[in-house]
Image: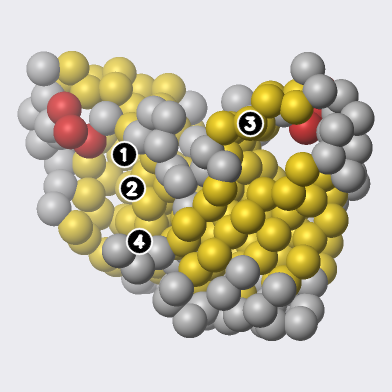
């Protein structure tokens, strides 16, 4: 069964702290995507990771991909309240150019 | 602004009624998608269209039909709405498999 598992599913943290969200997947895939969703809003594309060892950074967020371990991480550095959101990872299904399998999302709350 | 436009934003239907959700993108993307989002279940693909003139079933197509009217527009039709179709529906498009999705703002549908 194709599965994408995120952990934790819920994270409450203080501003200024560092933390990592993990995304494990069960299928062979070379492409992994991270999205952000604010409450009641749509989803916004954050990162597209296209190969083993890929690392991308935007502000306080850094994403990496290890295709051998079937693991991606989203690292938050010195968290600020504006990063509070739900973060989703998704992977491409090998053999299908168009279908993604999504994780359940990690709800991140950052307290001042 | 360029992007994906969905209408309506909110809709309440009675069981058995029909309706069409409209989606249009102005980014000249080939592929378009319809997802539903339910609490705790992440996003599930209903239908997708790899290119103008083609449509394919996703993970949860039952009870839905789609039309790729032209390259810009991809509509989702509920022929006989059921309470199980209460959900938030997102349309998305992307330039290709190495790119993230651009999502519309969503349609919150309630079937009573």
Q: Nearer the viewer, mark 4 or mark 1?
A: 4
Q: Is residue B59 left or right of residue B11?
A: right
Callout 1 crowding tier (Cα within 10 Å): few <14, some 14–19, many ≥20: some
Answer whether residue A23 is visible to the viewer in this image: no
Q: Determine if marks 1 and 3 fall on one subunit.
A: no
Above or below, comparing residue B23 to residue A79 in the picture: below
The residue at 87%/24% (across/down) is: B15
Confirm whether residue B48 shows in the render. Answer: yes
Query: Which is more toward the observer, A91 or B26?
Result: B26
Residue A57 in percent (x, y) is at: 21, 60
Which residue, given by chain and number where applicable, does mark 2 sit on? Answer: A74
- Earlier along the polypeptide chain: callout 2 or callout 4? 4
Residue B108 is drawn in which quadrant?
top right
Q: What chain does mark 2 sit on?
A: A
Q: Indicate which label's residue lies in the foreground, 2 or 3.
A: 3
Q: Which residue is mark 4?
A: A47
- The tag earlier along the polypeptide, 4 or 1, is 1
Q: Dots 1 and 2: beta carbons under 8 Å?
A: yes
Q: Which residue is mark 3?
A: B11
Q: CA distance from mark 3 to mark 4?
A: 32 Å
Kind of element beneath mark 4: strand
Q: Residue at x 15, y 41 (%)?
A: A77
Q: Chain of mark 4?
A: A
Q: Which mark is residue A20?
A: 1
**CA gap, disc 1 and disc 3:** 38 Å
Residue under the point 79% across and 51% down: B77
């Amino acid at each position: 069964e194709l599965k994408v598992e995120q952990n934790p599913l819920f994270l409450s943290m203080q501003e200024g702290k560092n933390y990592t969200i993990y995304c494990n997947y069960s299928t062979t895939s070379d492409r992994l995507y991270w999205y952000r969703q604010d409450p009641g809003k749509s989803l916004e594309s954050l990162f597209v990771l296209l190969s083993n060892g890929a690392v991308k950074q935007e502000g306080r967020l850094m994403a990496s991909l290890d295709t051998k371990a079937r693991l991606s991480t989203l690292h938050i550095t010195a968290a600020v309240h504006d990063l509070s959101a739900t973060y989703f990872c998704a992977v491409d299904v090998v053999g299908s150019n168009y279908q993604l399998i999504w994780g359940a999302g990690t709800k991140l709350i950052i307290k001042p | 602004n360029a992007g994906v436009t969905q209408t309506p934003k909110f809709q309440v239907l009675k069981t058995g009624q029909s309706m069409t959700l409209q989606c249009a993108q102005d980014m000249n993307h080939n592929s378009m998608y319809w997802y539903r989002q339910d609490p705790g279940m992440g996003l599930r693909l209903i239908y997708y269209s790899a290119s103008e003139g083609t449509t394919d079933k996703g993970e949860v197509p039952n009870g839905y039909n789609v039309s790729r009217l032209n390259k810009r527009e991809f509509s989702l039709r509920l022929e006989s709405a059921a309470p199980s179709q209460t959900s938030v529906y997102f349309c998305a498009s992307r330039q290709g498999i190495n790119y993230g999705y651009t999502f519309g703002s969503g349609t919150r549908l309630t079937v009573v």
